[in-house]
Image (cartoon, rainbow, N blue to C red):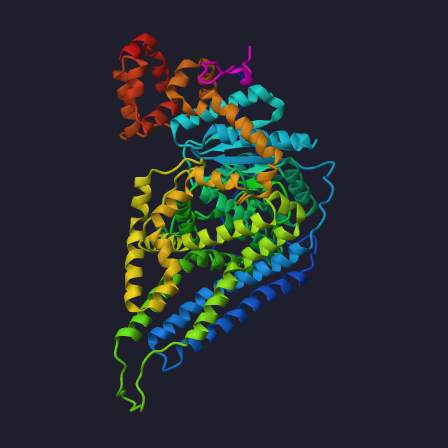
């Protein structure tokens, strides 16, 4: 008799009921060829002809506005900066300062004009079309997982399934958990959660699970493996992250949009951040809700059908992806060679090169994700993104790429190079003030001037230029705030106009204080990558747990010391320099307490109780989020994530049988080659007199070997388990 999930109590020893042989972990394979693409060879005749000719005038006018306006702003800013430093003869250092300022200012100028475009577009709200009544093509909803908690991921996927079923179009979708998990306890927890889910929902729910023995090429390889083996069953696939949530309506609308547009290769949604409670995560959540739509809409308007892909919460035409999304390895070793980390940008570029359109539906509702809970968690993820974006320096020159695609790559690269450029600008600024203050002017120059050469600045122009720069930086946040204030439902759901204004001020102040810390973190990442240090790939922490204070001190002590040195140096050089640098100095001095406070759950919840940093999705949580949280609590009570994998396999014959069914045939061992982990696992199992001995002696890699090997599993099962009384006595 099957055991219902709802009847299981925490820590229960309920067995998994074996499913019928017809209820396989995966459907029969239907292959698609996925050739590796070349970055050096491409001809125009390889590009497909579009089926529908879409008007492009509006897109080109939007690009003229964004980049033409950004160029004009940059020219004006550069002129003003030149006027600031050219009061007397301009020195080499001053020219360097002007050059660095131009680079940094151009970056924020284009961001400003893009946000302004998005603001104008969002002033005109469009009504959503009616939900389609039918779909003619099938879509696979795929969730790649890597050492994640099953309580969270399976709850999200089940909530998505329920929401899609509620639309009446559930028969058009199948669901896949694609595991690259490398931790044995997490792997068996995934299998147990999958079997329990299938037992509860029945085979008609069409949930499937696949675990790869080796996580070759990481997430990109995970998706490629699915496409090449099972992609032939589906016209589209909708890719999720482990923290994604999407409503049934959103998914159905994406599928309908793909069906209606024969030229679409990828359609990206805009995920909003939800379910966040630490102070740092709530800052991100608030900024994403208020400022995010302005930025995203601006991008969507000027990118048009030459858009980008963010790797999740997007629908993809499967055959187009198979034909053109196969990623090559870059020559050389990491960090610049090897597997492409930021694969999503490159996949979008290759599909666009082949003539498929890539675009974003920025106003589509019902797409959600989560965010890192602390500054340190963000920096760990950001380090990987930094390496991936800097790798794009070797992709941006690929043959056949569209000009907007190259601009996307350039933007991603610059998003990380901006930090060291800002750092260099600060250093040059300090050096110039030091030169002005302490170095004597040259009274008798070689060209026999009648006045001394003494670098000087125009303080009034400098102050005006600083105000202009800050205005351009803060403008997207102000645009988002204005839109929230204008929209009555959003304003009321965020606590009212006054609380919205106070919340935006809090977000601006804390973001300004955190900015120099992030600048140094990103600069350090860039320098490490340039020195050849690979980042690897660690699973992302998705809970709201705090980080030990000693780890915070260790990570930020250098930032604090640098803040002290910068503050003392600036004050000794000139009071005006100290005041000019005070936001940067203050942020660095407070790096440790800021990082600690931002990761605190209590601080975020305190502001939430006061109605600050509130978003409409917090005031009235989406039904799918409430359901996912409810299912997550139920799943957590089952205890799958907390149990030892080998003990679970040992105790449950049905689970063991199903687990063994999924194992691929063992490859033949080469003569003279000894696999260290297998040899150690075999020796330890041979020496073990009880299950407890094996559990104590086997390390993580050896456990993975046992779980992959039928013969070693049989040895494990043949061991005796000590009675509970004997274990307690020990």
Quadrant position of the N terminus in the picture: top right
Q: Position of residue 470 (x, y in %)?
A: 48, 63
Q: Position of residue 295 (x, y in %)?
A: 56, 54
Left-right relation of 207 to 385: right
Q: Is residue 3 magenta?
A: yes
Q: Is residue 64 magenta?
A: no
Q: Is residue 47 visible?
A: no
Quarter of image, res 149: top left
Magenta stretch: dominant secondary structure: loop
Q: How many tags in the picture?
A: 0
Is 632 located above or below residue 67 in the figure?
above
Is 248 located above or below residue 337 in the figure?
above
Out of 17 and 517, give the one closest to the viewer. 517
Out of 269 and 344, give the one closest to the viewer. 269
Is 241 located above or below residue 591 in the figure?
above
Q: Is residue 475 visible?
A: yes
Is 398 located above or below residue 671 in the figure?
below
Q: Position of residue 403 (x, y in %)?
A: 55, 61
- Residue at x 55% of width, y 34% of height: 230
Quarter of image, res 698: top left
- Residue at x 51% of width, y 26% of height: 633
- Residue at x 57% of width, y 29% of height: 158
Q: Position of residue 376 (x, y in %)?
A: 38, 44
Quadrant position of the C terminus in the picture: top left
Q: Which residues are magenta?
A: 1-17
Out of 623 and 51, give the one closest to the viewer. 623
- Residue at x 50% of width, y 24% of height: 635
């Amino acid at each position: 008799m099957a055991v219902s999930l709802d009847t299981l109590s925490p820590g229960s020893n309920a067995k998994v009921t074996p499913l019928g042989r017809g209820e396989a972990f995966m459907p029969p394979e239907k292959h698609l060829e996925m050739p590796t693409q070349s970055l050096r060879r491409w001809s125009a005749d390889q590009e497909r002809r579009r089926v529908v000719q879409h008007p492009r005038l509006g897109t080109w006018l939007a690009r003229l506005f964004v980049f033409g306006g950004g160029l004009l702003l940059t020219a004006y800013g550069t002129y003003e900066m030149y006027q600031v430093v050219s009061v007397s003869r301009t020195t080499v250092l001053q020219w360097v300062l002007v050059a660095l300022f131009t680079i940094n200012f151009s970056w924020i100028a284009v961001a400003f004009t893009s946000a302004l475009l998005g603001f104008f577009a969002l002033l005109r709200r469009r009504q959503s079309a009616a939900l389609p009544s039918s779909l003619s093509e099938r879509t696979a909803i795929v969730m790649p997982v890597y050492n994640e908690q099953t309580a969270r991921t399976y709850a999200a996927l089940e909530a998505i399934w329920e929401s899609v079923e509620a639309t009446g179009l559930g028969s058009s979708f199948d669901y896949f958990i694609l595991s690259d998990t490398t931790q044995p306890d997490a792997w068996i927890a995934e299998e147990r959660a999958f079997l329990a889910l299938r037992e509860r929902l029945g085979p008609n729910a069409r949930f499937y699970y696949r675990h790869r023995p080796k996580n070759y090429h990481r997430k990109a390889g995970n998706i490629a493996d699915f496409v090449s083996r099972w992609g032939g069953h589906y016209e589209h696939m909708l890719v999720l992250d482990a923290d994604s949530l999407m409503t049934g309506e959103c998914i159905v609308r994406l599928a309908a949009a793909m069906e209606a547009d024969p030229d679409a290769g990828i359609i990206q949604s805009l995920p909003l951040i939800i379910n966040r409670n630490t102070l740092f995560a709530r800052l991100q959540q608030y900024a994403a809700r208020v400022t995010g739509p302005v930025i995203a809409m601006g991008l969507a308007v000027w990118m048009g059908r030459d858009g980008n892909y963010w790797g999740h919460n997007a629908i993809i035409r499967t055959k187009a992806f198979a034909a053109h999304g196969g990623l090559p390895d870059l020559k050389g070793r990491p960090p610049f060679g090897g597997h492409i980390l930021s694969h999503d940008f490159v996949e979008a570029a290759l599909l666009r090169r082949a003539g498929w359109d890539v675009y974003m539906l920025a106003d589509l509702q019902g797409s959600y994700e989560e965010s890192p809970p602390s500054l340190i968690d963000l920096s760990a993820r950001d380090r990987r993104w930094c390496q991936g974006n800097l790798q794009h320096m070797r992709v941006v020159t690929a043959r056949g790429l569209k000009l907007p695609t190259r601009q996307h790559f350039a933007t991603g690269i610059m998003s990380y190079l901006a930090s060291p450029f800002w750092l260099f600008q600060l250093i040059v600024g300090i050096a110039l003030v030091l030169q002005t203050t302490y170095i004597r002017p040259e009274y008798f120059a070689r060209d026999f001037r009648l006045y001394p050469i003494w670098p000087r600045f125009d303080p009034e122009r400098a102050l005006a230029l600083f105000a202009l720069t800050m205005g351009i930086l803060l403008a997207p946040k102000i645009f988002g705030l204005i839109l929230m204030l204008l929209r009555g439902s959003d304003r009321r759901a965020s606590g009212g106009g006054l609380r919205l204004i106070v919340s935006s001020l809090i977000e601006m102040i804390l973001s300004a204080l955190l900015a120099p810390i992030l600048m140094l973190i990103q600069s350090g990442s860039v320098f490490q990558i340039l020195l050849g240090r690979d980042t690897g790939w660690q699973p992302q922490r998705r809970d709201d747990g705090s980080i030990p204070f000693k780890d915070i001190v260790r990570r930020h002590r250098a930032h604090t010391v640098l803040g002290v040195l910068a503050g003392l140096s600036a004050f000794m050089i000139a009071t005006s320099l100290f005041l000019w640098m005070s936001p940067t100095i203050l942020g660095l001095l407070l790096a440790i307490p800021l990082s600690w406070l931002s990761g605190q759950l209590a601080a975020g919840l305190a502001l939430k109780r006061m109605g600050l940093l509130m978003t409409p999705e917090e005031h009235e949580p989406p039904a799918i989020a409430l359901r996912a949280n409810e299912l997550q609590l139920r799943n957590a009570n089952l205890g799958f994530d907390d149990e030892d994998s080998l003990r679970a396999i040992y105790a449950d014959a049905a689970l063991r049988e199903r687990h063994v069914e999924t194992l691929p045939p063992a490859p033949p061992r080469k003569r003279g080659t000894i696999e260290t982990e297998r040899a150690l696992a075999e020796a330890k199992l041979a020496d073990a007199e009880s299950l407890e001995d094996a559990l104590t002696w086997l390390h993580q890699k050896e456990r993975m070997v046992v779980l992959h090997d039928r013969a070693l599993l049989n040895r494990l099962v043949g061991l005796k388990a000590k009675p509970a009384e004997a274990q307690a006595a020990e």
